[in-house]
Image (cartoon, helix red, strand yellow):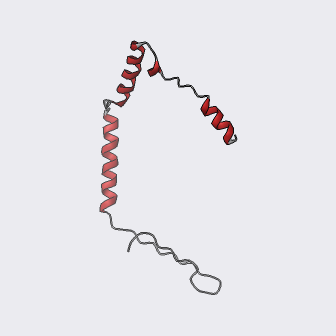
Amino acid sequence: MSERTALIDLAQFVGRSSLLSDDMAARNRVLNGITQRMLPRKRSVGDLLGVVMALSARTRRMVQDPVSVDIDVFAPGGGRAVLLQLGKR
């Protein structure tokens, strides 16, 4: 699509939001739907259990000792071919 076509489409755009309705009851229904989606919903026991398990796993990983991995890659001449450093020492 060329830029000119996109600009023409944008110029011909007509907003079709239900909030633009002249009917106040229709606008109130739309606003009520928007606010209901923004309100916190009740969480199930499964949701809470998932959060607890995720936090527990994260805590276990944080207290473990850091891992050190040595990778030796040599060039055909016998010298090191790769120097790889991840994280802090």
Residue 27 image offset from top left, x and y in percent: 41, 18
Image quadrant assignment for residue 40:
top left
Measuring 44% from the left and 21% from the top, which residue is drawn there?
19
Q: Nearer the viewer, residue 13 or 30?
A: 13
Q: Name the quarter where the N terminus is drawn.
A: top right
Apparent side of residue 64 relative to residue 20 in the rendered image (left or right): left
Measuring 60% from the left and 33% from the top, which residue is drawn there?
10
Q: Name the quarter where the C terminus is drawn.
A: bottom left
Apparent side of residue 70 relative to residue 47 in the rendered image (left or right): right
Image quadrant assignment for residue 60:
bottom left
Residue 73 position (above or below residue 33): below
Residue 26 position (above or below residue 88): above
Measuring 68% from the left and 39% from the top, which residue is drawn there?
4
Measuring 35% from the left and 31% from the top, which residue is drawn there?
38
Residue 24 position (above or below residue 3): above
Residue 84 image offset from top left, x and y in percent: 50, 74
Residue 57 image offset from top left, x and y in percent: 34, 52
Q: Nearer the viewer, residue 45 or 36?
A: 36
Q: Nearer the viewer, residue 38 or 27?
A: 27
Residue 70 image offset from top left, x and y in percent: 47, 75
Image quadrant assignment for residue 77:
bottom right
In the rendered picture of this protein, how many numbered marks are placed on residues?
Answer: 0
